[in-house]
Amino acid sequence: MKALHIIRREYVESARKKSFLISTILAPVLLIVLYAIPVLTVFLVPPEQISVAVLDRTGLVATEFVSSLSGTPENGKQTYKAMVADPMGRDPAAYKKILVESIKNNALDVLVEVPADVFEKGAVDYVSKDYFNERLMDEIKDKLDSIIIARRLAREGMDYDRAIAATTHIHFNERKITKTGMMEERELIGEFVLVVIFVMILYMALLSWGISVQRSIIEEKSSRVIEVLLSSVEPRDLFIGKIIGVGSLGLTQIAIWGAIMLAVGFSSSFAVAEFSQYVSVSFGDVLYFVLFFVLGFLLYSSLFTIIGAVCSTEQDAQQLQSIVVFPMVIPIMLMFFVLQNPNSTFAVVLSLIPLFTPMLMLARVAISDPAWWQVALSIGLLVVSIYGVILFSARVFRAGLLMYGKRPSLREIFRWFKYA
Amino acid sequence: MTPAVKLTEVSKTFDSFKAVDRVSFAIETGTIYGLLGPNGAGKTTTIRMILGIILPDSGTVEILGDSLRSRSKDRIGYLPEERGLYRKMKVIDLLTFFGEIKSMNRRSARRSATDWLDRLKLSDVAVKKVEELSKGMQQKVQFIATVLHDPELVILDEPFTGLDPVNVNVLMDIILEFNRKGHTVVFSTHMMEQVEKLCREICLIDKGRKVLEGKLADIKKQYGHNSVTIRFRGDGSFLKELPEVAGVNDYGNELFLRLKDGADPTRVLMAAGSRLEIQKFEVAEPSIHDIFIEQVSSG
């Protein structure tokens, strides 16, 4: 098998390149930094104090609102410096102007104005320069809401203290049914982000390794080594050698990344107990990752060999390669939808389309638990398409290899397919 | 004996351009064969078809008594027209790889590469990267890649183009050595000096067609001794009008005249002597260069 020698040369020579070393070491470092930043900010950046002033026209709400805001912060992220804005005999409208002025000067963050008719109309003014975040607004609203509802109930004759107890808001404990059927306390948003990163790594690995197959072929064409190779081996050996050689180096890189991640994951879950809460990718997910890398690589890299075979220069190839890159970007754009609705009909159909399967089925199995037949069907369809694509590209590869100079049109490529 | 290479009515068309048009020839085992022709005549396309790098549109190619398969590829050594080496690889690794894809095992490929590097005085650069080598050294490495596996059939496409005189001699030595072992050497060229020195047989192609083929000696005989090289001072344009003259090549300082069958060279000398100051007059067999020029410019 002459392909074996091609595979070995491809593997060894590419592994010796500096670019391989750099991408193998640098990528996980970058990823860890990217992922660690938001986690670390929670621990290292002191919570910001939000100053809130209440201008109360009813005279019934302010004191309690201020004391409920000043209590222990619930999510540990924000503390409030709340105060009652007392006009002390001044014209309330003029006083409001002064408060708005201090928001402009950053002396105050939020002004809440409770109008006299709040119990009838239920409208409260919320004035702020920054949007802050939804959580902050929700929190302020919930607190005020309870007090106003309790006041309404008190007007209907209920005891105020009992009313305030009755209006306490509920709290969601987020729990997810995992693939093992266990219920675990999880921060769903953290898991979501992790799956996004997981799928993005697959996308980037498939893209960069696919393009290196293409680049390796173009390099052989432009250095004319290709003629020496073809006088010794069949184009089929070269085609197989390129794909398997580059692909196994890609797998090696993934294995190294996996080992690094595992090491970091272990050491940090001892150091920071909270970290394990964020790492929710299971061993099964990793197996799927490897499976979809192998299948996706076979699919896309066969297409990249066509680009490599028909182009004589990198510049030519860069224009043409978008034909292959485009179907890889589509699943990335659809990924957020699929992650939010992993078992919707649309998501199921998308993940069965072979060009999208590697990214989207991985997203589905990582975030939820799709029916086994869907996973099996998607893999089956993918394998069948890989077979077809390899047959097609191996033919075009053979015909295109020795075409130097002018880049062929798509029609010519199909004609080669017929002749080859 | 089966010929080393046999082409029968081979044609190849690129788009509407007929690169090779119904070319047939057979190359005997153990010969040194020259494939001649001007630039763009179809030499490289013919060679690529012999090697199975591209397939002919029609016609058949037989190599070493077989249709070309991976197996027979192992018995061929090929030096492409434009040199092709992996620039980032170490010389010894590169040569070992080229040996391996000719079905040598790793150890014997490495040993053969080392021997050849020794012989061509390149041992010092064995562990250097190809791109660190001078152009002349890279050319030598490419020769080694061609002959490393001791092929029975060596095919060289324009091997002498761009070589310095030292490397020309190195290559000629290799060609003669292979010939002595009874191996077949085929090379294309438009440099006639090496053809005269090396080739036993030639095939001349022009515009994709075979113009002339056979043993060098026979071809020369066919052109006869009836040719004249003349150097003179004065206007010699009338010479081509002489009734004895069949063809003319004007080389500037000298004029080559091919005479008609049975024509008497003495009459040419007398005609020339009456009107020109003659510096040199030689009756000789035509050189392959003369034949080449005449064939290609008349076609």
Image (tube, coloured by chain):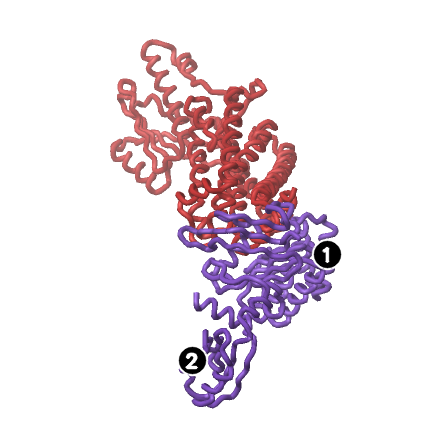
Chain colours: A red, B purple
Assign a secondary structure to mark 2: loop
Find residue A224 and report its horizontal and vertical position in percent: 55, 55
Quarter in which the C terminus of chain B is drawn: bottom left
Q: Decide: is A53 above or below B218.
A: above
Identify residue type, mark 2.
Answer: Leu
Distance in Å between CA atoms under marks 2 and 1: 60 Å
Locate residue A104 relative to residue B218 in the image: left or right. left
Q: Are marks 2 and 1 in contact (CB under 8 Å)?
A: no
Locate residue A95 relative to residue B208 in the image: left or right. left
Find residue B22 and report its horizontal and vertical position in percent: 48, 53
Which residue lies at the image location 49% right of the left edge and 46% below the top edge?
A: A399
Q: Chain of mark 1?
A: B
* Image quarter of residue A266: top right
Find residue B203 and report its horizontal and vertical position in percent: 54, 61
Find residue B291 and report its horizontal and vertical position in percent: 51, 70
Q: Earlier in the sequence, mark 2 or mark 1?
A: 1
Is residue A253 visible from the viewing direction of this image? no
Which residue lies at the image location 41% right of the left edge and 12% below the top edge?
A: A162
Location of mark 2 (residue) = B242
Identify residue type, mark 1.
Answer: Ser
Q: Are marks 2 and 1 on the same chain?
A: yes
Neighbour tally class for label 1: few under 14, some 14-19, many 20 plus, Cα within 10 Å: many
Q: Chain of mark 2?
A: B
Q: Decide: is A280 above or below A322.
A: above
Is residue A157 visible from the viewing direction of this image? yes
B114, A11: nearer the viewer: B114
Location of mark 1 (residue) = B112
